[in-house]
Image: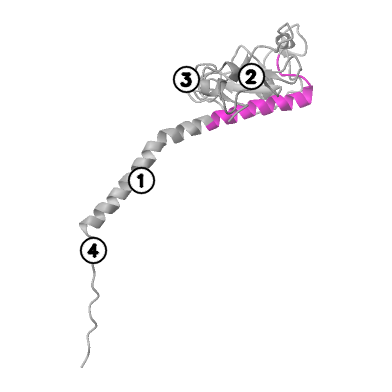
Amino acid sequence: MKIQPRPTSQRGFTLIELLVVVTIIAVLAGLVISQAPKMMEDARKLEVRNQIISVTTGIRNYQVEYNRYPIDPALASSGGGDDAQPILTNQNSTIIDTLMGDAAQMPGASSGSSGGSINLNPKGIEFVTFKVAKNGRNGLVGTQSPYSLIDMWGSPFYVLLDTNLDRKLVNPDVQNQDPKISQSQVSPPPQFLPTDVAVYCLGKDLVQMTGDDIVSWRE
């Protein structure tokens, strides 16, 4: 007599089990969606920080090569022993073109002050590379020299230089409108920054000296 094997019992998912799985997926999706704007904003800030690092590195490399700052000597003296006013990375300044060297293809530049503008990078060294902006943001703006370097929100960067050579810069955070920064009890801002180069941008709110600023001297 041949014994037939007992059929294996098969059981599908119950409605309750399916509902539990769908609920878990919905909760996880909700968490991801809720965090998406913050993640995108953090990514934008990281890109801007990388731009700030590029500018700072380019200036320091220039200093090593030329033993001076990449700005017109006339701008380096503000009188009264103070540092020069912040240099903006827009078309009113040649700092970005100078750091780019021959890559900027600066027309009419000369080694002297007559017959053209002063060539602050006569060796044509490319100290830093910047990407071209998309829709006028986050990169180089302009079809020819002088170029502007614009942040993620459409504003130029601010460059502070120790032009009086005292190895310190006035700390903008002292006048910051955000009391969590300017009046911090845990980590109050020092009056001076112990550096010769500092770079910052206005951030998303486009207002100077607020907590939204992205700066080179703090996280």
Identify the magenta region: 46-71
Give the mark nearer the N terminus: 2 vs 4: 4
CA separation, marks 1 and 2?
A: 43 Å
Residue 12: mark: 4
Q: Quadrant of residue 118?
A: top right
| Secondary structure found at label 4 | loop
CA separation, marks 2 and 4?
A: 67 Å
Mark whose residue sits in front, 2 or 4: 2
Q: What residue is pinned by disc 2?
A: 171
Give the mark nearer the N terminus: 3 vs 2: 2
CA separation, marks 3 and 2?
A: 20 Å
What amino acid is found at the position of numbered circle 4 in the picture? Gly
| Secondary structure found at label 3 | loop
Q: Nearer the viewer, residue 146 or 137?
A: 137
CA separation, marks 3 and 1?
A: 31 Å
Q: Residue furthest bottom?
A: 1
Confirm whether residue 140 shows in the render: no
Predominant SS along the magenta part: helix
| Count of marks placed on residues | 4
Q: Residue 31: x and y, percent?
A: 37, 41
Residue 95: mark: none
Viewport quadrant of the C terminus = top right
